[in-house]
Amino acid sequence: MSDPSLLVLASLAGGDKHGYAMMQDIQQFAGTRLGPGTLYGAITRLEQRGLIRGVDSDDRRRPYTLTALGQRELQAQLASLSQFVKIGSRRLHEL
């Protein structure tokens, strides 16, 4: 799995995080390292679409949170991936 937007949504489903914490979380659960440009590009796109939003913080780092729309988008993408996995697995077994 390497879609940066999906990885960010999945990371934030586990709780609010700032960019560096997301990079570490994604590395841990997906085995994929997103560079800062890739990560912050995805964050910008997701914010513009209303899927995530920044959270006020006293820290210099800005945490982000998943919006209700972002939760629905993540659920839809995971359902689509689940269907993909089912079809791919069935086809492999037919070989």
Image: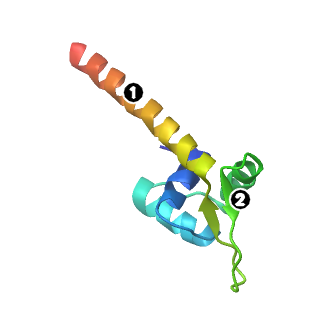
Mark 2 lies on residue? 40
Q: Is the residue 86 above or below the residue 5 in the image?
A: above
First in sequence: mark 1 or mark 2?
A: 2
Where is residue 94? Give x, y as percent. Answer: 23, 13
Amino acid type, mark 1: Gln
Please indicate, yes or no, whether residue 4 appears anywhere in the rendered image.
no
Horizontally, residue 20 falls left or right of residue 27, namely right
| Crowd around label 2: few <14 · some 14–19 · many ≥20 (10 Å) | some
Q: Residue at x 68, y 51 (%)?
A: 42
Q: Which mark is residue 73?
A: none
Front residue (pair 43, 39):
43
Q: Is the residue 51 above or below the residue 56 in the image?
A: above
Nearer the camera: disc 1 or disc 2: 1
Is the C terminus in the top left, top right, bottom left or bottom right quadrant? top left
Mark 1 lies on residue? 83
Where is residue 22? Give x, y as percent. Answer: 56, 65
Q: Secondary structure at mark 1?
A: helix
Q: Residue at x 43, y 34 (%)?
A: 79
| Colouring of the image | rainbow
Furthest-bottom residue in view? 58
Q: Residue at x 73, y 45 (%)?
A: 49
- Disc 1 from disc 2: Cα separation: 29 Å
Furthest-front residue in view? 68
